[in-house]
Amino acid sequence: MSGISIGEALTRGSCELSPVSETAARDVQVVLAEMMDRPREWLLAHPETPVPREINDQLASALQRLTAGEPLPYVVGWCEFFGRRFTVTPDVLIPRPETELLVEKGLQAIDRHPRARTVIDVGTGSGCVGVTVALERGETRVFATDISRPALLVAKENAEWLGAGGLVAFVMADLTEGMWLEDAVVLANLPYVASDEVAALRCEPRLALDGGDCGTDVILRLLQQLARRRPRRATVLLEIGAGQGSAAIDLASTLCHPGSVWLELDLAGRDRILGLEF
Ligand code: GLN
């Protein structure tokens, strides 16, 4: 008798994952589709097809990693962001849907800013923000910084694979150090989770999440860099944590005295982006 069928593998996998995932059925489809190099829809249309033994073994070890709490994007090696597939490794933060708002607001800022020819993606991680902006607005020069060399390698690979290789310059730098900021649109999804909450999150790099005692240490450092330089006509958009809005507004106003400062809320109505205009 031959091995297990696709339909059986999906049902069993889904049962195995259901205690740890609310999207167990979908998760196992994503994993098996990746391993069989077929679209998810194809699997659903071919439940009788046998799963080759070695793929079944790979599936078992992937399910083990997932039940142990490893996030699905690390197990399959990619994550979708703004309709594109970004490679992710444990060296980078997994792109979150809420960060798509940062991209949308960044694109709007580029469009309404007649002189904004440069975008700086500060702390680029997987490159999802900078690469997306470059692909959506090809005429804009994008610089993407990170202090993590392994993260920059992942970001660069993403840029090349998605066809933005020549559009984004990757720079190993501490936040905006060494960057020309006048007339720029500065976008940043910096770490903003409070240290004691990061402990529970595991898996993702601490460097990408840990924002110190209150979560705002790295954002504060960026605001200090901006305060020193007061870049003329720059628009700055920073992703922040829900509930950090009023603290972020206070910090930005006191330190930077920008021309304007505001908050953008996400779809759930939570504080999500701090905006400054110089
Ligand atoms: N949104 C992420 C989370 O809550 C945090 C991202 C970040 O720190 N920039 O896990």
Image (cartoon, grey):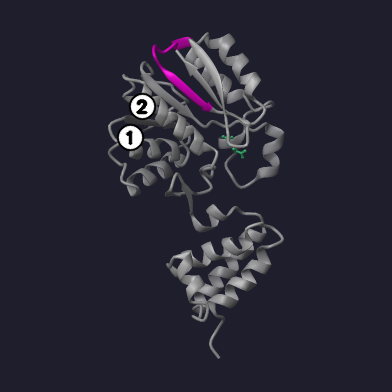
- Residue highlighted by disc 1: 137
Q: How many marks?
A: 2
Task: Please state if 194 lies on the left or on the right of 116 as rendered.
Answer: right
Tell me the residue at 51%/44% (across/down): 91
Q: Residues within 10 Å of mark 1 (few under 14, many from 20)?
A: some
Q: Amino acid at mark 1?
A: Arg
Picture quadrant where residue 68 is located: bottom right
Q: Is residue 61 above or below residue 103?
A: below
Span shown in magenta = 228-238
The residue closer to the viewer here, 198 or 20, is 20
Q: Amino acid at mark 2?
A: Asp
Measuring from the top left, give residue 44's x and y in whole percent.
Answer: 51, 71
Q: Earlier in the sequence, mark 2 or mark 1?
A: 2
Measuring from the top left, give residue 197's x and y in whole percent.
Answer: 70, 37
- Residue highlighted by disc 2: 111
Picture quadrant where residue 136 is located: top left
Regarding residue 172, the answer to whether it shows in the image is no
| Label at residue 116 | none
Quadrant position of ligand 1 = top right
Mark 1 CB lies closer than 8 A to ligand 1: no
